[in-house]
Image (cartoon, rainbow, N blue to C red):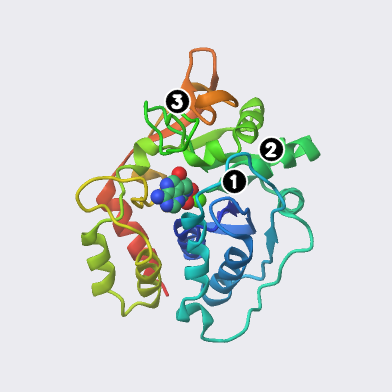
Amino acid sequence: MKKKIYFNHDGGVDDLVSLFLLMQMDNVELTGVSVIPADCYLEPAMFASRKIMDRFGHGSLDVAESNSRGKNPFPKDWRLHAFFVDALPILNESGKIDTPVAEKPAHLHMIDAIHASAEKTTLLFTGPLTDLARALDEDPSIEEKIERLVWMGGTFRETGNVEEPEHDGTAEWNVFWDPEAAGRVWESSIEIDLVALESTSQVPLTEDIRKRWASERKYLGVDFIGQCYAMCPPLVHFTTNSTYFLWDVLTTAFVGNPDLVKVKSVNSIVHTNGPSQGRTEETANGRPVNVVYDVDRDAFFDYITQLSKKV
Ligand code: AGV
Ligand code: CA
């Protein structure tokens, strides 16, 4: 049986590649897609999502826009990536967009999608949790129809990936953008799988992987992901604040193939205020989350490249 997946993303290159990959998985049925303007601008991220669904999808879904706002904005340079993906010739060949924009905002769209499915829904979030927090406040009855939340977010290491004034550097960005939303979801009883920096740091974008995609660009899907990752700074000598990892793509691959990773349970809290806001911290009396802390790197890259060859 196919897993029912609702996907909420924030329009980064790896969010949009994730959307493409999800639609190539035989064991996944996508029940809805929505876009939150966190690590993107909303308009190009919506266009790009709809064009990716036109070109590489199979179903008849619409895409919902989020009207959520965060506390700590993403750097503009990163948010601009959605414009580059939207402009790719491969997505603009037909000159039209068929996939419609949903009438309802993302959090209400997600509530409808959860109720519309007889089976429980797995939520895949590759941006901040704001829309989920708002959905839980709006309609707490969705909780019992959620199979689990798979989230790219957090870290239990001393150092996260936020380098901003007035912050101590302990947070991961998706938590930092809206720490209170994460805090709200932590209060729920939803099973949480956290694809944290522990595992995503093992899958940086590197030259060898770019070369591999270039050598196999005769496959339309491999060409597409190669073009997308041409926009992102790879890891060459050492990691910088702009080095690109396959954060969300690992999270998405985990949904399609959980055997790629290792998971352990950690009790944790979320810091919602002050210089550590957005930090996820291990604490004996915190709520349990399943942390994805290790990945078989080669098997992961084989898996996503294989999926990309299906188109
Ligand atoms: O913290 C990782 C999250 C992922 O959801 N995003 C990017 C991924 O989509 C924020 C982010 C952290 N560092 C970045 C980010 C960078 N160097 N460029 C763009 N986005
Ligand atoms: Ca993201």
Q: Amino acid at mark 1?
A: Thr
The label shown at residue 265 is 3
Residue 37 or residue 91, whichever sits in front: 37
Q: Is residue 160 visible?
A: yes
Lower sequence index among marks 3 and 1: 1
Farthest residue toward the top?
285
- Whole-percent x and y of residue 15? 50, 56
Residue at mark 1: 122
Q: Nearer the viewer, mark 2 or mark 3?
A: 2
Residue 37 or residue 145, whichever sits in front: 37
The label shown at residue 133 is 2
- Whole-percent x and y of residue 110? 71, 51
For marks 2 and 3, give the CA distance: 22 Å
Left or right: 107, with 75 as reference point: right
User: Is the residue at mark 2 in contact range of ligand 2, meaning its CB lies under 8 Å from it?
Assistant: no
Viewport quadrant of the C terminus = bottom left
Q: Amino acid at mark 2?
A: Ala
